[in-house]
Image (tube, rainbow, N blue to C red):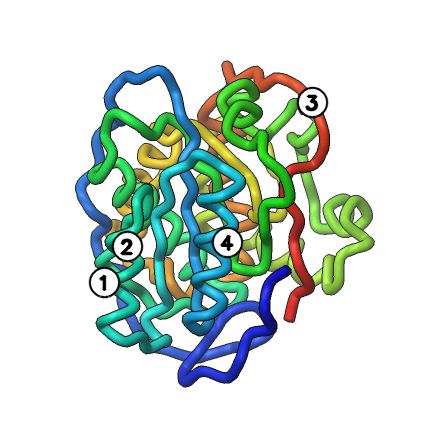
Amino acid sequence: VFPQPRGQRAVAHKGKSVSFLMAPTALLPSEPPAASSGAACISLVAYENVVWIDALLDNALTLTGAHVALHLNALSEYDTFDLERWAAMERVVLSQQRVAVSRNTGSILYAHLINARTLNASFPTTCTHLVLQASNMAWVRPGMDAEVTRRHSFLTDDAALANVSAASCSALYAGRVGANQICSAALRSPIVQHLARKRGLWTWKAHEGVFYPLAWVLEFGAALDSWAQANRFNVLEATPMPEEFWLPIWVLNEKADATPAEASGPQVAMRGPED
């Protein structure tokens, strides 16, 4: 059971909006991961207090065999003692580049991209797949590692929408709060239009627990960084909810040959409440 988060200075995540000014910065250099027998690694993006971070890491290290990259919100402050303690944990690496993360902006996705490159640099022969973990989710039983490498990608054919419009998007996702406004804003976004240009496919997926081959995430990160710099586009402040649109849309349009296997076995993770 996870402890309730306690008060901490300058925190920002779901339910807490923090404004900031930061131009997009270049990600760490990326190369495809070296060949290996295949292993899932976790990108964990968090902002909470020390007790909560300890619980997240203990949960991930106990119920999975994954290596974990931890991105800590630049708006959250931690003692050097705790930072060094986490960095010394087996199978854990701290991302040294930290950005200010705020709700519903590209900063969430960007933090995961930083983690992806940190994992690739730190464990180049280990990580073949990347699982995105938010700090409001926990693993509830073992089995994630084998399922991720078996399925390859969480996306299936039924995830793709062709010739999508604001009306059809709103109707399909009517159960989501603010679906009409979010669909309209996402479809107007120049980066979404760019990512979907090849096949015109579109989707909207919660990012907690999704997984892809690490090479795909690194390729996407490089493409995003290049486009953002060329178009003077601020990734960190982009809306709405880039973590739920950009990467899956890019995968659907750029990885047409991807044929993930169907899910099998019981649920291995659960997402907590929004706030």
Q: Give the amino acid type for the residue marked by disc 1 in the picture.
A: Glu
Provide residue 188's location: percent of width, then percent of height.
56, 54
Q: Nearer the viewer, mark 1 or mark 2?
A: 1
Q: Which residue is at 31% across, 75% downward?
A: 78
Q: Give the amino acid type for the residue marked by disc 4 in the picture.
A: Pro
Query: Which label sits on residue 236?
Result: none
Q: Label 2 near label 1: C-beta < 8 Å?
A: no
**In the rendered image of this protein, does residue 249 appear above or below residue 51?**
above
Q: Label 3 near label 2: C-beta < 8 Å?
A: no
Q: Residues within 10 Å of mark 4 (few under 14, many from 20)?
A: many
Q: Name the residue tied to disc 4.
A: 242
Q: Name the residue tied to disc 1.
A: 84
Q: Name the residue tied to disc 3.
A: 264
Q: Residues within 10 Å of mark 2 (few under 14, many from 20)?
A: many
Residue at mark 1 to residue at mark 4: CA–CA distance? 31 Å
The mark nearer the N terminus, 2 or 4, is: 2
